[in-house]
Amino acid sequence: MTALLDVRNLKVSFVHGKQSRPALDDISLSLERGRTLGVVGESGCGKSLTALSIMQLLPSPPARIDGGEIVLALPGSSRDLLKLTGKQMRNVRGRDIAMIFQDPMTSLDPVYSIGEQIAEVLIAHEGLSRADALKRAVELLRTVGISSPEQRVRQYPHELSGGMRQRAMIAIALACKPAILIADEPTTALDVTIQAQVLAVMRSMQQSLGTALLLITHDMGVIAEMADEVLVMYLGRIVERGAATEVLEQPAHPYTQGLIASLPSLDMPLGERLVPIQGTVPSLAAIPSGCRFHTRCPHVMDICRTDDPGMRAVTSGHEAACWLVGRSP
Amino acid sequence: MRRFLASIDTKAAVGFGLVAIVALCAILAPWISPYDPNAQDLLNSVAPPAWAPHGAAGHLLGTDRLGQDVLSRIIYGSRVSLLAAFAAVIASGAIGTFLGLVAGYFGGWVAAFIMRLVDIMLAIPFILIALVFMTVSGPSLTNLVIAFALARWVQFTRIAYGLVLELREREFISACITSGVSKFDILFRHILINIAGPLLVVATLELGFVILIEAGLSFLGLGTPPEIPSWGGMLQEGRALINVAWWLTTFPGLAIMLTVVGFNFIGDWMRDSFDPRINIGRSLSDQVVASER
Amino acid sequence: MTKAMSDQALLSVRSLRKSFPVSRRLLRRTSEAVHALNGVDFDIGAGETLGLVGESGSGKSTVARTLLRLVEADTGTALFRSRSLAAVGLPSEIDLFSVGASTLKQVRRDVQIVFQDPYSSLNPRHSIAANIGEPLRANRIGSGTERRARVAQLLQDVGLRPDVMQRYPHELSGGQRQRVAIARALALEPDLIVADEPVSALDVSIQAQVMNLMLDLQQRRGLAYLFIAHDLSVVRYMSRRIAVMYLGRIVEMGGANEVLQTPRHPYTKALIESVPEPKPRLRKERALLQGDVASPMRIPKGCPFHPRCRYAQNVCRSEPPVLREITPGHVASCHFAEQMTSAPRMSHSEAEV
């Protein structure tokens, strides 16, 4: 299956005057039709930056793209998004690639009804008349599971609950049936029962439209529910990638192992202690030499301090950036 | 602190420079002033600056009607301006901040009363209040400071009130309450220090404003008495001769303008420094992490 | 002191109610209100942790605030055994909600709070030492040097280096700040710490560190916790007993393991089923909860959960259920609690009602 979106060797840094800090280093990923790629990591790892880079929504300055390609391959055209003009990119956003964010209260415009916000996308990209666009908006609200959509379509964001607002965001994002949907922590701000509903909506929309989903989250459980493949990021690099089931059940990189071991679960024996990862994430101003994770790694060896392992194969389709991977026992 | 110093840009540096010059003039006036500001030299009256045609040697900025050296009077005039400015701002700032703290923290009818008072005072243009007050109680620096204290406190209260309302809900204030910190300490040890930043911005802008008002009142004859050199007074005296002796109004006017501009630049820099959203001085790593949230 | 406390209980809350009026419209007869708490009862024993779990609108944060008297309860009692009062010879079983100001100041030493947001729970303009030492200063405990020594010790107790004392909050990470907040809560040597979502704002790896720290401190100091969170797995890790709240009421309470293995209330069951678990092979069958969380301004009649409950019957719509004991130590407020069967996380066997 060919990739719809192919990010190759993306490098992004933050600059201020003379100084610069590498924020994303050599990020490569690909999205395929109908599949979900999860990106998981903690604050500062660069997962949101990756999403913003794809959408060309980076605040620049201070962000600066130093290299790489982002190839959008739709039937009939294949373009490097980094080379598009502002106007061309605006055409891509909303129509070919859509994005939803974490906080639906601030990502919806408070002075327009949700119907109008959905219609705006339809009018801009599909040239619908306002009346037609509003009719489609009602249908879209119905598909995302909002009850009484004929009334809701005229309501304003503050009149809706968090879960409904997020569904409205999904409706806006999927209005033009984009090939790709990027979701940045879409359920983090929601109650867990509502989160379950919203994830279900996303999954069913994905199945019916065949959208490729790039799902960014810090929650391993959400990854397990939704993702086919997963990338684990740390300090601006990808440290592990593979099929979600495999990475979660047999994590190869000590960071992934540490993350999973830090999670309390409902099944764990009472009285058993979690084993947190030692230390804290280093600042981007002081990235460790060699393997970036060596300062916190329980299995650190001498070579880890000096040499940077590249991605090494664990099994076919599963790789991790660790010297321990591929060593004979 | 280091972050603050790193964030001083050209504009702020200019502001600091200007204010520093004025401050030095005020402090060192007796030593740097070429003449006694009240020394009359009637033979040399209304003399152009030394470097202008027909200029009087030894008078860098010329002389006035009574032969008094303009430069010396400007240097000494800085004392009046700065004294008036700081006294007025300290007085109005103290009153205004206190009332804002009380209104913001206690709410209820106290707040309602204070804020209605603010509304009333804001409705009346300050220059009118100042004029009336100075006319009634007589022109003097003290009365100017009193007029300021009575009317301009509202600028501080307005800002302080809003800031306290927001701060009051922050969890560290709740933590103070649950730790047994007294209300007095909460207001003056915890809240005040957190609202000081924006209030200092208001204060620097008010400093400029006082100087303008003082100059205006002196110009109208309602400011300082004529023996004490003041920039506004010099404007007043030079007005009649403005066609023949441009230097009598230009230089005091410049002094006023540059001082006010200096304070305003400093105020702008302070405001930007205190705004956490603007990235001045913030380390890059912080910015990267902040972009992830 | 009308009711005697049970021998074990450190804190005994009964009939706690709190409503927040919303501004009244001119022409309306009655004003609207947010009914945050509608009759909450629970006990916490010395040295034990009661986990309080619920979603937004459940009222769990309001419980914390009323206990600390940051907000005044409308009715109810909170009988508390205060060591500080006993130490000065005053009667030590008091009602937290009704004590006067000077007694409250004494009692405050025994009950402290840790908040959710490490970014706003410290005074940004005070040093770490000043932040932690403030409770000592406010209660006139020790001299300046003694306080400094105490602060250094507290920092070590929470796993930070004492030289952090002269730093400022913005120089520390979220996890470090939360440790400082815990150190501050420990300064007065309380018996009970109310922790309101203390790890929700932290990264996953830091959450585990701070949770372990709290467990260690509990073991070393015999602290009791009221541990409030919305994350069921976190609450289970920290607590021996759990109480589930919905719309201002406790709908189920009992031993952590028992409540989670054999939930007796449909809401608890739904919460358990909604938690995404990072073990993909156990992708659960589950029926998702319909509808949105009801608003505490318009609490449904009868059982407050009935509009979202897949087992709702007529009686649920008219009669509010009472919190009653189903098995020893395990209470739930559902008309059909006895028929709730176990194991919601494998393929379901629904209650036949």
Image (spheres, helix red, strand yellow):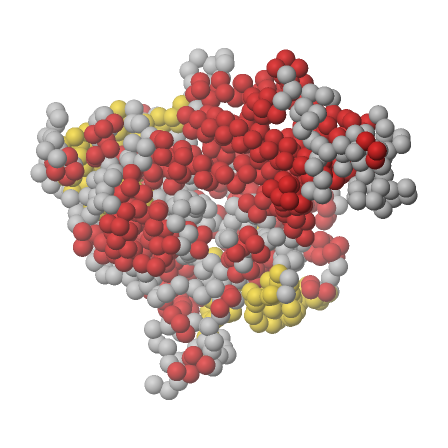
Choose top left, top right, bottom left or bottom right for residue B258. Answer: top right
What residue is at 18 percent from the left and 51 percent from the top?
Answer: C221
Whether residue C99 can be seen here: yes
Residue C176 at x, y = what percent?
37, 56
Taking depth in this image into account, of A59 and A147 the one nearest to the observer is: A59
Total residue callouts: 0
Q: Does B89 sit left or right of C223 as displayed?
A: right
What residue is at 37 percent from the left and 35 percent from the top?
Answer: B186
Q: Does A8 sit left or right of C158 as displayed?
A: right
Taking depth in this image into account, of A67 and B135 the one nearest to the observer is: B135
Taking depth in this image into account, of C2 and B228 the one nearest to the observer is: B228
Residue occupying the far bottom of the picture: A328
Residue A312 at x, y = what percent?
47, 80
What residue is at 79 percent from the left and 44 percent from the top?
Answer: B58
Q: Does C84 sit above or below residue B152?
A: below
Q: Does C74 sit left or right of B210 as displayed?
A: left
